[in-house]
Image (spheres, rainbow, N blue to C red):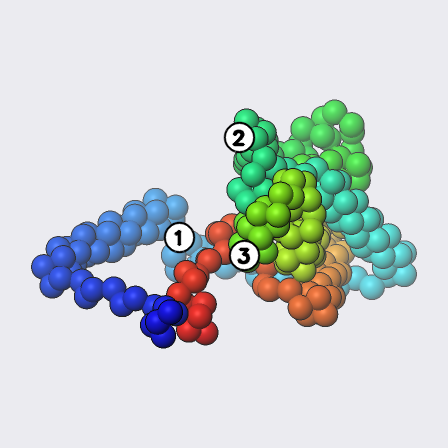
Amino acid sequence: MTATADIPTRTAPEPPDRRRRRRPTRSLLAAAAAAAVLWSLLNTDVGVASLVRGRAGAARLLRGMFPPELDHELLSRVVTAVVETLQISVAALFLGAVLGLPLAVLMAANVQTARWLSAGARAVATVLRAVPELLWALLFVATVGLGPAAGVYAISLHAAGLLAKLCSEQLEAVDPGPVEAMRLTGATRTATALFSIFPQARANVASQLLYQWECNIRSSVVIGFVGAGGIGQALGIAMNLFRYQQMATLMVAVVVLVVGVDRLSRAVRGRLGAAAPNRDLRCSIRFPQSLRRQS
């Protein structure tokens, strides 16, 4: 048994000619990206000129919003709308988790479900998250009518697709050592998932659920503009009736609600000792075993 068994092997340095061949490719990619950004900015009329042209409308809107209305009846309606928004977000999180977490289990590669089940779950999750909440909301408003029920259904379907994607990546990112050890003892796929994969991933899965709750709050404000309940519906009514002072009060309530939920969610994630939520839909990086020994 040699002492060099745990020493990571050094990779050979990249040849200079290969590095030289990569430089033109990177330059071309950078030029193409810059051209795409410039083309997009020019064709969408983004710039200082469009802001200057809209200064009169912005000034009129700001003058109309101040001071915010603090009528007792309005504040009572704002509190009711905030409570309804919270109810929509929590109910949508529950339904989204009920649908999304089983899909995540079927999608995770290390759970090793049947290929047709994994592919089917991945297709369902892709469809659910590909349709925006606003479009789901329009469909449900047309079917179940105006109100918070349409908002819950719309947000929960989109949340299910996101949770399936993100939580499956958390399940796949666990340490493979205990998983393989259980399989070598003859454990079934279900037992391996329950006693090896889930215990390692539960804190990060909980973190994803809490982050999804934050997203549900923001989404419920947006879909309220199409009649799906919550504080967004009150904002839409105030805007359509040009009641800008009421709109300012509602906007302040939205900011307070979002900041409060964000702080609460961050505190709970810290207590769980969970990693930061995977907000950009990328897989977690798994380092080679040799690099783990160095750390």
User: CA–CA distance between discs 3 and 2?
Assistant: 23 Å
Q: Find residue 282 and name its label.
A: none
Q: Is residue 33 above or below residue 67?
A: above
In this picture, residue 113 sits left or right of residue 75 = left
Say which residue label 1 marks: 46
Instruction: Inspect the image, locate mark 3, and give the three-letter code of the amino acid beneath it.
Output: Gly
| Viewer-side label of 1, 2 | 2
Give residue 101's quadrant in the image: top right
Q: Position of residue 64 (x, y in %)?
A: 67, 59
In this picture, residue 181 sits left or right of residue 21 = right
Q: Position of residue 208 (x, y in %)?
A: 64, 54
| Viewer-side label of 3, 2 | 3
In the foreground, 131 or 177 = 177
Q: Residue furthest top?
A: 143
The residue at 32%/51% (across/down) is 37
In the foreground, 37 or 180 = 180
User: CA–CA distance between discs 1 and 2?
Assistant: 47 Å
Say which residue label 3 marks: 177
